[in-house]
Every structure is written in C-alpha cells, then in structure tokens.
Amino acid sequence: MSLPSQHDIIIAGSGPAGLATGLHLLQRAPELAQRTLILEKARHPRPKLCAGGLLPDAVTRLELLNLDITEVPHVKVPWANFTFQGRGMRMTADKRDYAFYVIRRHEFDAWLASKARERGLTLQEETKVLSVRHDGNGVIVETDRGDHYARAVVGADGANSVVRRAVQPESSRNVARLLEVLVHPRNGEAPKGPPSHLPDEAYFEFGCLPYNIQGYVWDFPTQEGGAPRRCWGIYDSRVDVKGDRGDLPNTLNEFMARYGYTPADYTLQAHPVRWFDAHATFSAPGIVLAGDAAGVDAAFGEGLSPALGYGEIVADALADAFAREDFSFSDYRKRVLGHSLGKALRTRTFTAKMLFSIRHPGIQRLLWWRLNGLLHWYINRFVINWTER
Ligand SMILES: Cc1cc2nc3c(=O)[nH]c(=O)nc-3n(C[C@H](O)[C@H](O)[C@H](O)COP(=O)(O)OP(=O)(O)OC[C@H]3O[C@@H](n4cnc5c(N)ncnc54)[C@H](O)[C@@H]3O)c2cc1C
C-alpha cells in the first residue's frame, strides 16, 4: 500500500474561496503557498449554477489581489431595481459607474484558476475529496485518486462541503434553496401587467414573500458567448425555519410568465447556498472552512465577495498557525467574527430574519414604496460595501 503524499496545506475546492485563499497565501506567506495543493473534483471551465452578480465589494477584493475583472466576459449593470409588486427603488454604486458586474461562473472561475496557476499555485483537477479526518498530528485527506496527508486543510468545497462534515455535524441547518434559468431576452414583447424590465438593468422582486418564499425573484442581464441573455431565478433563504414553505418552481414560473416566458422556454436548475450563522462551528483541529462551506449572505445569497473575503482571513490564519506551530485553529472563529466580512454577514442574517418575516403585502408595500429611502440607506450602510468598513 502506498503512503499518503505529504503537504503543508491542502485546499479542497477551486471556486472563488479556495482560489482566493491560495492567492492571498502567495501575498502573505509565499513559501507556504509553494507547499500548498489545491484539489478540485471537476476540471475548469466547469459548470457552476450562479447568477454571477459580482458586487463592487467583490471587485475591490479582486483589486487587492491585483486582478482586473474586465479581463473576464461580463455585462456591466448600471442600475439594480429592488421592487415589491413592480414598484420600489433603483440603486447604483456610490463610487463606481455601475451597480454590479454580471459574469458567467464557468468563465470567471476558469480565469481565476489560470491566474492562480500563472502565479505558481498547484491545482490538481479531477480529484474528489471523499473524507477528511484529524489523526492527532495532521489531517488525512482521502480522495478518489489516493490519500494525502496535510498539516492544515481548508474546506472551500462549496455548499455541499465534504470537509464541513468533519467540522459541523449540524450541517443540515442554514441552507437556502435557489432555482435558476438562462433565457433569450424577450425584447419588444409586451409584459403581462407589471412594468417592463429594461434590457440593461437588474431586478430583485420581493413580491414572492406572500407566497411563503423568504427571498426574492431575480432577473439579471447576462451573456452567452457575447450574445445577450437574461438570468432569472428565485432565492428562498429559509431563515425562518418554522415558516411555511412556498412552491419555488411554480412561483418562479408564475413571475416569469408575467414577462412572456413559458416553462417550455427553459429548464430549471437548483443548487443550495449555505448562509452565515455566527453560532456555527467554523474550524476543528487542523481544519478551517471558507466560502459557502462556512456560510455566506442570508439576505441576498450573495456569496462571491464573501468567498473572496474568506480567502484573506484563512490565509492569515494559516500563516499564523505555521509561525506558531499551533494548528488548533482555536482563534479562527474570532478572526471571522472580527473581520469586516464576518460583521457584514452577521448583519445580513439579522436583516434576512427581519425582512423576510414580514409576509403581509401591505407592510412590504409600505417598506418598498414609501420607506425606500430608509431601505436604500440601510442597504448601503449595513448590507453591502463591507470592504469599505
Ligand atoms: C442559483 C445561484 C445563484 C447565485 N447567484 C449569486 C450571485 O449572483 N452573486 C453572488 O455573489 N453569489 C451568488 N450565488 C452564491 C455563489 O455562487 C456562492 O456563494 C459561491 O460560489 C461560493 O464560492 P465557494 O468558492 O465557496 O464555493 P463554490 O463556488 O461552490 O466552489 C466550490 C468548488 O469546490 C469543488 N468541490 C466540491 N466538492 C468537492 C470535493 N468533494 N472535492 C474537491 N472539490 C470539490 C467544486 O467543484 C467547486 O469548484 C448564487 C448561488 C446559487 C446556487
């Protein structure tokens, strides 16, 4: 029987959280980055269900890694509309000339992986992590292509994380459900009832709250090979565990039908997002979690800027662990909660619990139609722009 190969650090998953961890390690402790192995079950470019909304916080995080988002195919969205029954408010970024970018994840992640490789990180694709376990001195990582042994392991393997099972036995909690479709734009066709959606703007419609969906329906402009497309989807945070469960597919179909789409036009695809719970466990001896595996935004399901932000927190924790020869990661929770990202994610969980507990249409109308100036301020001040705090 062959002995497990030895590494200082293994990162499970090469999505934004895993790659940002590697890229931050290169900046923070280049010698450790050289002794890091990233394991990825797929091969880039690989499919990843995601609307690809990349907020200014994510752009800032990329800039800190000397990465330029305009190298990736994208749509720059000038305005994001937040509505209840078609009426509400429009937002754009304060210090930028857009509300957010929309990228396609297979293109974005492949680009990030190519940057990681160019800068010297080792990424082994088509290797699925099957289990991780601490054996007293280090962590044994079992994969479908043999075993590895590492002094520290990063679980950046997404919402259905295998690594998390070694850290959070309570792993069935805090899971949001999402459905998404990609469609051809219905330019020029009259919508049935609500105000038209403009071709270059993005929409977050909270009119699904009375349908027992604890979230919103989205409609973003995007592209496929440079040709315009719309990405529609529905987000159900399920922050209120006792609340009734709405019917996600039928609600999304009903909202899209108002804009002329029929279910024959698309195939619904589903994937979960794990949201941030300040009381959850984020580490175990030798193991830390990042990105979706740890928990991201409960209010909007925004996980890209958090995934990139976790990269910095994890890289700092790893560098300190090797400097002190202490791999307990007992201070990792404090690092997450004390970072501006952890503070923002905590606020977003609170916001989701407040906002989505109000199902009465009259109160939601009051919020989005009359008190939208207050909401605008709150979102800017407490929900987004965490990289500026
Ligand atoms: C429908 C939908 C729409 C979304 N829209 C947005 C949006 O518009 N904006 C936004 O900011 N966020 C959005 N999100 C959230 C966002 O996609 C995630 O938060 C983000 O991808 C988290 O990044 P990550 O690196 O933690 O995980 P992932 O991106 O999931 O990456 C995990 C990586 O690990 C690999 N992997 C998984 N298991 C294993 C294993 N056992 N062994 C080895 N490798 C493994 C995967 O192949 C993948 O490459 C959306 C999510 C969904 C489901």
Image (tube, grey):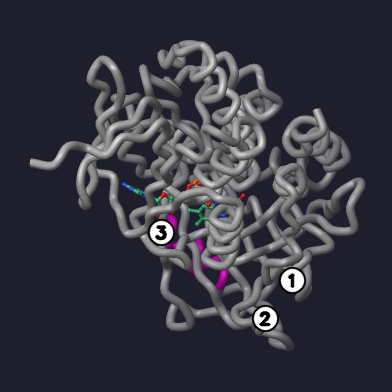
Determine if residue 358 is in view.
no
247 is within the stretch colored magenta: yes
Residue bearing mark 2: 228
Answer above or below: position of 92 versus 287.
Answer: below
Disc 3 residue lies near ligand 1 with CB under 8 A: yes
Q: Secondary structure at mark 3?
A: strand
User: What residue is at 61 percent from the left and 47 percent from the top?
Assistant: 304
Q: Residues within 10 Å of mark 2 (few under 14, many from 20)?
A: some
Q: Quadrant of residue 245 in the image?
A: top left
Report whether the residue tagged 2 is closer than 8 Å to ligand 1: no
Residue placed at 55% from the left, 39% from the top? Answer: 21
Q: Give x and y (percent) for residue 50.
A: 53, 59
Identify the residue position indicated by label 1 in the image: 197
Name the residue rendered at 37%, 25% in the picture: 151
Q: Residue furthest left?
A: 1
- Is 173 or 244 nearer to us in this picture? 173
Which residues, given as a range, are shown in magenta? 246-256
Name the element at disc 1.
loop
